[in-house]
Image: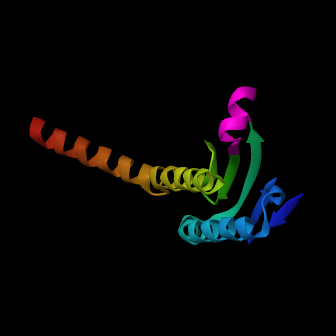
Amino acid sequence: MATELKEVALAGFNKLDPFELEQVRKIISGYVSKFQKAGYLGMRLHLKSIHEKATEEAKQGHIHQIDGVLETEHGHFSASAQHRNPYHAIADILENFSQQIKHKHPHKEEWKEAAKTERKLRWKKKKT
């Protein structure tokens, strides 16, 4: 069952208690406000609980895996994160999204092309 939060689809988060779910929403809303600058359209996050080994399960508990997709005007980004603490897993995946957005800036390709033409012009001037 998915819970909606301002264009954010949360799947598998119904296993968390209401306080934990509210904390997750606060973390997500902080990052969504940062994503608005990149033409944010929506995000899907899916929480899964996985176990490493049956012997370690009793000692340390299960691992939370979050798979996510971020949709922006400039493309789709996907990431996944695993951690024993669900808050850390969410923070990791959202930080991964912000790094991907930072490296895929919409004007980056235009800037590269402009720099190439400037270098070519300077090179031609040096030759003559």
The C terminus - image quarter = top left
**Residue located at (74% from left, 37% from top):** 50
Check the image and name the residue furthest to the front: 59
Magenta-drawn segment:
51-65
Q: Is residue 114 magenta?
A: no
Can residue 65 be seen in this snapshot?
Answer: yes
Q: Is residue 120 left or right of residue 30?
A: left
Residues 62 and 102: in front is 62
Residue at figure coordinates x 62%, y 51% from the top left:
85
Does 57 appear in magenta?
A: yes
Left or right, 51 with reference to 97: right
Q: Is residue 29 above or below residue 76?
A: below
Q: Quadrant of the N terminus?
A: bottom right
Q: Residue at x 53, y 50 (%)?
A: 96
Q: What percent of the width, then of the height, locates residue 90?
A: 62, 55
Query: Which is more toward the observer, 83 or 60?
Result: 60
**Pick the front one: 42 or 75:** 42
Residue at x-position 50% and y-position 57%: 106
